[in-house]
Image (tube, rainbow, N blue to C red):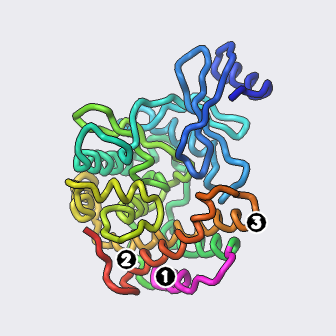
Amino acid sequence: MEVDPELAAWLRDALGEPGPFTLERLSGGNSNETLVLRGAGPERILRRPPAASIAPSAHAMDREFRVLRALAGTGVPAPAPLACGRGMLVMERVPGFAPTTARPYGVCEAGEAVVDALAALHGVDWRAVGLEDFGRPEGFLERQVARWRGQYERVQVRSLPRFDAIADWLEANRPDAGAPAILHGDFHADNCLLSAVEPVRVTAIIDWEMATIGDPLLDLGLLLAFWGSDRPEAPAMPRVQAFSRSDGAPSRGELAARYAERSGRSVDALDWYMALAFWKLAAIVEGAYAQYLDGRLTSSYAQALGDDVPRLLDEAAAFAGLVGSHTAR
């Protein structure tokens, strides 16, 4: 697609290139638009908020720019940020592919690489890289239920009694928070790019707009909540579910143990973090479904979100032990 004159002028100034520029939309990225930017130099990635916003915190390009800049030189695989302005972010395009697509090697190696990258992120000294004021780590875990319960109540379009039951359980069973770290905020297999050849490694963790400083087990909880279940129908993100059920995939327990070994952190309360992850995601997805109902979102994907929310809550309740037994591998 052609670039409008105002954006072209900003790109010329920000990148120091004469243009012309073109944009091509990439698939994926449900919170923000992700486009390939082509000009006189190498291909880059341009990210910008969509026309309809699910939650303001999901579109913070300035925060994504800042955390990517802070991670430069740390060894954490992340794209180099190039420019930020006009509500948009330009970064390098890193070679790699999502592990949920075709892989030239086994899912075991891919899963282990994803966990290793997460442990590396959580090992970064966030104060030393200039992120002292990037979040509010004190009381972070204690604020989570009130934060996302409020988000849900602002967008609620139907009665979902299980939401409040899980919230009450989370409050009553909250573990002691771990030492704060850089939190990606939306960490799952589809937000990692992998190398095309062995040894398998993550070439880039992407989509950092939800990053903050807080309890890093929230990242692990989301990753492993999506991992390796024999449920007949995925509660959300079916590509991630299919990937983690492939032949040879490591179990949730094996990946949790690997993370604990690499990070030195306890994973004893993992069920609580997995319950929080899906309960929080249900609050976010309900907001997107509300936008479908009022016409701001019109895709079939948005329509299907209405079914995802109850499934996510069912899974969260299972992690919490409020219903049945959870059939995790």
Residue 305 in percent (x, y) is at 58, 65
- Residue marked by disc 1: 166
Side of 95 relative to 196 (left or right): right
Q: Residue furthest right?
A: 6
Side of 49 relative to 275 (left or right): right
| Disc 3 from disc 2: Cα separation | 32 Å
Q: Earlier in the sequence, mark 3 or mark 1?
A: 1
Q: Is residue 216 visible?
A: no
Q: Earlier in the sequence, mark 3 or mark 2?
A: 3
Task: Say if 64 sits above or below 230 in the image.
Answer: above
| Disc 3 from disc 1: Cα separation | 27 Å
Please rate how many residues cluster around mark 3, counting C-alpha atoms within 10 Å: few if below 14, some from 14 to 19, many from 20. Answer: few
Residue 172 in percent (x, y) is at 45, 85
Residue 178 in percent (x, y) is at 37, 64
- Secondary structure beneath dot 1 equals helix
- Secondary structure beneath dot 2 equals helix
Q: What residue is drawn where x is 34% and y is 61%?
A: 227
Query: Looking at the figure, which quarter contains the C terminus?
Result: bottom left
Side of 36 relative to 311 (left or right): right
Residue type at mark 2 is Phe
Question: In terms of secondary structure, what is the magenta stretch mainly?
Answer: helix
Tell me if label 3 and label 2 are in contact, CB under 8 Å: no
Residue 219 in percent (x, y) is at 41, 58
Magenta-highlighted residues:
156-170
Q: What residue is drawn where x is 79% and y is 24%?
A: 5
- Residue marked by disc 2: 319
Residue 200 among magenta residues: no
Residue type at mark 3 is Asp
